[in-house]
Amino acid sequence: MLVSYNWLQDFLNLDQEPHALAEKITRTGVEIADVKHPEEGLKKLVVGKVLDCKAVEGTHLHLTHVDVGEDEPLQIVCGAPNVDAGELVIVALHGARIAGNEKIKKGKIRGMESYGMICGLQEIGFNDSVVPEEFADGIYVFPEDADVKPGQDVYEALGMDDYILDFDITPNRADTLSMEGAAYEVGAIVDQKPKIEDVVLKEDGPDWTDSLDVKVDKKLAPKFYLRKLTGVKIQDSPLWMQRRLWNAGIRPINNVVDVTNYVMLLTGQPMHAYDAKTFANGKLEVRLANKGEKLTLLNEKEVELDPKDIVITDGEKPVMMAGVMGGLNSEITSETTDVILESAIFDPTLVRKAALRHANRTEASSRYEKGTNWDATEKAINMAALLLRNDVSATVDEGIIKAADTKREPVVVKTTISYINKVLGSEISPEDMLKIFDRLGFPVDRDGDDITVHVPNRRWDISIPADLVEEVGRIYGYDNLKSTQPLLAETHGGYSEKEEMMRRMKLLLKAKA
């Protein structure tokens, strides 16, 4: 999980240097594999506005003049196919450093003076996998809503001033596969309560819940929620959202798909969006695939479904491999106006096996197979609807279809303060131990030495007293635990009485001989 330091500050008041914070997190139990600062090694990269653009006859080149906030515009020769007048672009000035420590100098191209370089995202260090498709083979163009002006450094606008903490998460700590989960974890370490906001959603469309007949096998999907939005205008996401996506290793696609990915990163709940026309017949079913059924996925890969794959169907044919990837036949396109959002919990074992079987592990499947927070299902779908309502003025139809709504009660673990201290070899006072549980966000009932700990659903890795011992130990600080030799039963050397007698007899017999 790639965790943005800047995004973490939405939840916590962090004043620690990112590398120092990463070291502290690692020493507390979740390893930080790396800390990256995308801006590092780059210099003299600014926003430029292309004033004019003229094609150079007989070549793929363009002669441009670019305002970079200086007294005079710069003449730059650019070979990108998508360069055009009026665009706000990334400009590497004379003397700039771009990715690979490459230095940009003024020079001549086909006899034309060029005083810099108009850049694509890859040229300043972005991975190909996160570059929006429209800019994959050309320069990057800032969207119209970007709050940038010529001459301004590009780093903040592109999220490159951030620090990215690579959480190397073990399967038992999948609760940190979300920004909220990471905020709870870091908050416990730095002794702060994260600011986690509730979702307040206004429904302004008609009730739609009777328009779709939904059948769900609750063994396959114990929770399955749907919402509908109408009047959606498909377009690019706001730049702030794109920044957060690509810093988390996800390519921006369009506003609807990006919202589902953003909410997954925020809450840890995978989501999916369907073009509502997919269910024009008024039916949706969650079931196991039939032998011989096929589905073309969103990545245009056709798969032959296995009878153990969970699928979402329109009542007849599959439109999604549940928990893994959607089908091309239900894709959100530029023609989409009505959207159905899905937020669900699927059988983790079946999702994992399907992803492996079809060699198609995704961000969603990796979360489902490790476990998800059952309390986030409704929050996630309401958050996604709220973002679309606010960003593109979509209408949120009234009601959620809860075709499956199995409840999961929080785990209650009983233990004693003395047991935890005994296992840790510590002498933590009851007050300090209760404070540790408070930092973790675990309510505790105490009766003398006995404690009853109420574990929220967001920490599904905790179920027995030994888990609580580990939590107390790591938050207290392993460095604060005394180093002692293990206590073992003492074994005295020497021979038994019988052996002593036999040896004495042997010596006497030898002497007489």
Image (cartoon, helix red, strand yellow):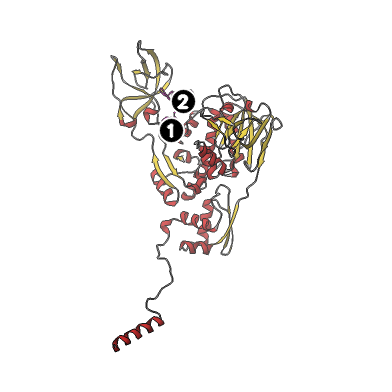
Residue 107 falls in image quadrant: top left
Residue in the picture at 38% in, 37% down: 37
Disc 1 or disc 2, which is closer to the eye? Answer: 2
| As drawn, 128 above or below 61 | below
Is residue 153 at all visible to an observer of this figure? no
How many dots with numbers? 2
Q: Position of residue 161 (x, y in %)?
A: 40, 35
Side of 451 where 114 appears, left or right: left
Is residue 116 at all visible to an observer of this figure? yes
- Magenta segment, prevailing SS (helix, strand or loop): loop
User: Type of residue at label 1?
Assistant: Gly
Query: What residue span does the magenta drawing correspond to?
Result: 127-148
Residue 463 falls in image quadrant: bottom right
Residue in the picture at 33% in, 24% down: 93
Check if residue 12 falls in the magenta segment. Answer: no
Q: Where is residue 305 in the image (x, y as percent from the top left)?
A: 57, 34
Q: Specify few, some or many for label 2: CA neighbours under 10 Å numbering under 14, 14-19, or 20 or more.
A: few
Front one among 427 and 216: 216
User: Type of residue at label 2?
Assistant: Glu
Q: Mark 2 points at which residue?
A: 133
Q: Position of residue 56 (x, y in %)?
A: 35, 12
Check if residue 136 falls in the magenta segment. Answer: yes
The disc placed on residue 159 is: 1
Residue in the picture at 28% in, 21% down: 106
SS at mark 1 in the image: loop
Residue in the picture at 68% in, 27% down: 281
Q: Where is residue 231 in the image (x, y as percent from the top left)?
A: 62, 24
Q: How far apart are marks 1 and 2 (CA)?
A: 19 Å
SS at mark 2 in the image: helix
> Which numbered disc flags the more N-terminal residue, 1 or 2?
2
